[in-house]
């Protein structure tokens, strides 16, 4: 019996939920560390997460390609400085096969319930009831649940309509009149390609955005040759980008030269990219640059100035059968309406029903908005870890770098379990409360609190990101403090 327990302890049953960037990464790390009882479930039919769900025209990453890949699996050649969505999806497909993760994935399998009973997790999926695991690792993504606001008359529209994350490729947009609602990162990418094929594009702006003009240049043959021939060149360029992100990233958390530099660049960008004074006025935000997530684009302003594109800043009154009517009384008639209206960023692993110790539910735990212990765990939910959980850095950073740090943290916890004599570990309440109190205090100095509405802000009014620098985040993940956990 003792021997069997030892064997089971060495090979805990681990469930990873999600096969996007984070789930694939966790799978690779678990395989490499010799874990054999690993199952990965994915509710869709293929890997890729956000890069599978989003297929809208113009989709690309706003982190440079050389940084937006796993540190252990650099891709030798990308077509653009910031890759197109389809190339990133292909990368994850390829990596999941190459590292043997794909064969662990059960596709079309959706977890509906996870209950912690008798020291283990009991999990129901749409296919099977009551499967038992020692650990659950959620890798469900941050921008996963598209939101279409409840506009008055939304269902009365006679044309086609869809959210950008559910692009309907069966709709031919050539020479069509298209309305795009929203001015976030997605809208900024989609307006240019639409303006090139549609007869008319109206972009509905509720809030203007600051735009950082990072040129997304094509990589020519020479760049590709360098990248293929000299891996060190790739490494060096990646290092430069990583350092730039580490330093530039401080612009959101500290009021220093980085913030001043970025803020001046975006203001100059608006000044010099938009000639028409009226349009420039419409496009000028009344909040500090970086307060909302920075939109990165080298073509949005240019596209807005095309003859067939119009920026409407009168609020939307209602959707009617022929189009969208604004508060100024004007009706814009459309064949197609595209909702670039963002995501529910507070859902995390929901709608899964998660029940922890003594019947504690996720809904209770997060009644005032999602919180966590150091972004990866929660009191009352033993042996459950999250990748990209509440307050994981989500600024203009590479989420891959975040996931790499968190997955290593989780591996350290698993190692601790293998060596320890406990059934489960759960972060203690005091440590979690202290972490969150420190976090709220640190938020006060961030630009996110400088007075704007954004998807960063939780229902509790606290930004869902990490208020310290990227180095502090990596440091916090590198050295788990096991004294801040309780054990049974
Ligand atoms: P975002 O950044 O959440 O943008 C959503 C946009 O939709 C934003 O401009 C919103 O205006 C607008 N919106 C949302 N609801 C409404 C209503 N009711 N009326 C008018 N306009 C509305 O989502 P994205 O998809 O662009 O980007 C998400 C992330 O994906 C991005 O940050 C990258 O990480 C990748 P608001 O600014 O709230 O006034």
Image (cartoon, rainbow, N blue to C red):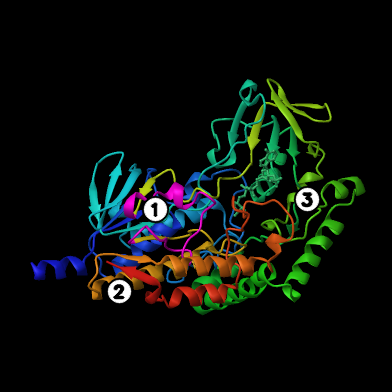
Question: Any magenta on residue 6?
Answer: no
Q: How crowded is mark 1: few (under 14 residues within 10 Å), some or many (20 or more)?
A: many
Determine if residue 349 is in view: no
Q: Distance between the residues labelled 3 and 2?
A: 52 Å
**Of labels 2 and 1, the one closer to you:** 2
Residue 137 percent across, percent down from the top left: 36, 58
Residue 454 percent across, percent down from the top left: 66, 52
Q: Residues within 10 Å of mark 3 (few under 14, many from 20)?
A: many
**Which mark, by number, is residue 418?**
none
**Which mark, by number, is residue 301?**
3
In this rendering, the answer to whether 240 lies above or below 343 is below
Residue 7 percent across, percent down from the top left: 15, 68
Residue name at image x 44 percent, y 60 percent: 387
Question: Any magenta on residue 368?
Answer: yes
Magenta residues: mostly which secondary structure?
A: loop
**Numbered disc 2: secondary structure:** helix
Mark 1 or mark 3, which is nearer the start of the sequence?
A: 1
Q: Give the range drawn in magenta.
A: 357-383
The residue tagged 2 is 416
**Which mark, by number, is residue 19?**
1
Picture quadrant of residue 138? bottom left
Residue 102 percent across, percent down from the top left: 32, 54
**Numbered disc 1: secondary structure:** loop
């Amino acid at each position: 019996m003792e021997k069997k327990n030892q064997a089971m302890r060495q090979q805990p049953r681990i469930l990873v939920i999600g096969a996007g960037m984070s789930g694939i990464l966790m799978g690779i790390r678990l395989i490499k560390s010799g874990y054999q009882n690993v199952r990965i479930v994915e509710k869709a039919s293929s890997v890729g997460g956000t890069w599978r769900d989003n297929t809208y025209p113009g989709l690309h990453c706003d982190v440079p390609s050389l940084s937006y890949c796993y540190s252990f699996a650099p891709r030798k050649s990308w077509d653009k400085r910031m890759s197109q969505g389809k190339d990133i999806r292909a990368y994850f497909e390829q990596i999941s096969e190459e590292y043997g993760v794909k064969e662990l994935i059960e596709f079309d399998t959706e977890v509906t319930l996870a209950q912690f009973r008798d020291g283990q997790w009991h999990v129901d999926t749409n296919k099977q009831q009551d499967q038992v695991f020692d650990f659950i690792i959620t890798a469900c993504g941050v921008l996963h649940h598209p939101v279409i606001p409840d506009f008055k008359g939304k269902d009365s529209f006679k044309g086609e309509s869809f959210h950008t994350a559910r692009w309907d490729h069966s709709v031919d947009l050539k020479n069509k009149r298209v309305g795009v609602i929203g001015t976030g990162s997605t809208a900024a990418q989609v307006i240019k390609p639409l303006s090139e094929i549609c007869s008319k594009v109206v972009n509905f702006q509720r809030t203007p955005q600051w735009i950082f003009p990072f040129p997304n240049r094509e990589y020519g043959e020479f760049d590709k040759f360098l990248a293929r021939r000299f891996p060190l060149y790739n490494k060096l360029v990646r290092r430069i980008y990583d350092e730039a992100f580490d330093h530039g990233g401080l612009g959101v958390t500290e009021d220093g030269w980085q913030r001043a530099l970025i803020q001046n660049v975006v203001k100059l960008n608006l000044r010099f990219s938009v000639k028409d004074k009226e349009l420039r006025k419409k496009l000028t935000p009344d909040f500090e640059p970086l307060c909302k997530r920075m939109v990165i684009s080298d073509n949005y302003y240019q596209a807005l100035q095309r003859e067939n594109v119009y920026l409407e800043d009168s609020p939307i009154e209602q959707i009617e059968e022929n189009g969208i009517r604004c508060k100024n009384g004007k009706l814009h008639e459309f064949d197609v309406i595209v909702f670039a209206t963002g995501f529910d960023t507070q859902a995390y692993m929901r709608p899964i029903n998660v029940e922890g110790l003594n019947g504690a539910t996720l809904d209770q735990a997060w009644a005032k908005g999602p919180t966590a212990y150091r972004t990866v765990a929660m009191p009352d939910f033993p042996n459950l870890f999250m990748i990209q959980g509440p307050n994981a850095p989500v600024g203009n950073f590479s989420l891959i770098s975040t996931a790499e740090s968190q997955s290593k943290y989780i591996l350290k916890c698993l190692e601790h379990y293998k060596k320890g004599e406990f059934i489960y570990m759960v972060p203690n309440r005091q440590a979690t409360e202290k972490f969150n109190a420190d976090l709220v205090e640190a938020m006060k100095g961030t630009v996110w609190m400088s007075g704007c509405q954004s998807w960063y802000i939780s229902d509790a009014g606290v930004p869902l990101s990490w208020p310290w620098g990227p180095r502090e985040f990596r440091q916090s993940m590198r050295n788990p403090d096991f004294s801040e956990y309780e054990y049974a």
